[in-house]
Amino acid sequence: MQGIVLTASAEFLEAAKQEVLEVFPASKLENLGDSVFWLPTETDPAYAQKQLLMRPPIFVHHMHAAARWPVHTEEEIIQSVRERLLADLPRVPPGAKVATQGRVIDKAIAWQPRQLKEMCDELLLAHGYQPQIKGPEWVISVTQAGPMVYYGLALARDNLSDWAGGMIHFRKEPGDVSRAKYKLLEAIVRFQLDFPTGGHALDLGAAPGGWTQELLARGLRVLAVDTGELDPRLRGKAGLVFRRANVKDLRFPAGTQFDVITSDISWDPFFTVSMINRLVEYLRPGGQVILTVKLMGRKPLPTVRRVMASLDPKLRVQHAQHLFHNRKEITLHLVRISE
Ligand SMILES: C[S@@+](CC[C@H](N)C(=O)[O-])C[C@H]1O[C@@H](n2cnc3c(N)ncnc32)[C@H](O)[C@@H]1O
């Protein structure tokens, strides 16, 4: 049997399933765990995966096309995956970087993804490939849930994230002022964002300053705005101006043009939209907005859709995604279209 293994956060699993059902209404989705589900497909799952990629589901962190079959022991998992992989490897171009991602969803079978990875790495090396953990081109995905193993081999970019289950991790740096920084970092990596060196960023709700710190590190000048104080470690940083103010009172001289506007304020989502709409005139054409939209206590999918429909028409939604580092919120990446 074949299909797609999809991962979301546990609290938005239903929203993720709803999105998938909009594309495949006749499907019988099956929960594999509290944040993982299975979409069975009648035809090649790689084709269904491409259909999902055309408009990536907002609440899905990761997916991998797979064949599934029953297993009882670790040895069976390793041997059966080995056979499939040997048959599949000719699809992968010579010398490619290939990661092995093994995931245990429950403990129905006692096994170690480490053993599986050792077997795969040995096979990859023997066939002239490069076993890789970070930044792979191809991924061998093996998920075990209940008495089944789900195996697939795909281009990393087709899985939405090249981290197992989308669980991307960043190394904590000694000077980090806030964990919120990882949200922005994940958006930068996942959406492949690029900022103009020397460009001007406006960071709304900036304190304690994780996003500001990351924007500065990427060569932008930053105007950081918050009713509270920035972390003292950011004081005097080159390129940083801090304005202690309520965002609602922000006014700029006519002609002010930012290259990037970011916002991570814990507000009602529609307040956030009206604030961004009011500031569009200060964003240059082609300029980018990265903002979190909070969903606390709201129906996730209808709220996100209404938010996107309420944006100023000059803003195009480039990406809308619940990221691994998002909690009860999603991240939007918008671009101001030319007049
Ligand atoms: C989640 S924190 C932002 C964290 C920040 N992105 C970071 O990386 O450190 C939200 C911030 O929004 C600020 N805030 C909330 N309402 C505001 C308003 N009306 N005007 C300015 N700042 C506001 C809060 O003071 C708080 O510092």
Image (cartoon, rainbow, N blue to C red):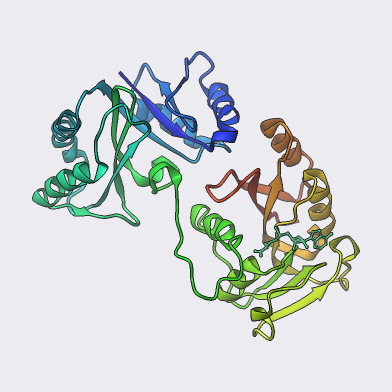
Rendered location of residue 328, percent (x, y)? 65, 43
Question: Is residue 36 depicted above or below 284 in this figure?
Answer: above
Q: Nearer the viewer, residue 163 or 26?
A: 163
Q: Is residue 53 left or right of residue 130?
A: right
Q: Is residue 285 left or right of residue 27?
A: right
Name the residue: 45% across, 52% down: 168
Q: Nearer the viewer, residue 186 or 91?
A: 186
Rendered location of residue 5, percent (x, y)? 40, 30
Q: On the rendered image, what quadrant is the C terminus found in?
A: bottom right
Name the residue: 71% across, 35% down: 305
* Image quarter for ligand 1: bottom right
Name the residue: 29% across, 34% down: 152
Q: Nearer the viewer, residue 187 or 279?
A: 187
Q: Is residue 209 left or right of residue 103?
A: right
Name the residue: 79% across, 48% down: 273
Q: On the rendered image, what quadrant is the N terminus found in?
A: top left
Q: Is residue 331 left or right of residue 23?
A: right
Question: Is residue 205 depicted above or below 21 in this figure?
Answer: below
Rendered location of residue 297, percent (x, y)? 74, 36
Rendered location of residue 285, percent (x, y)? 71, 61
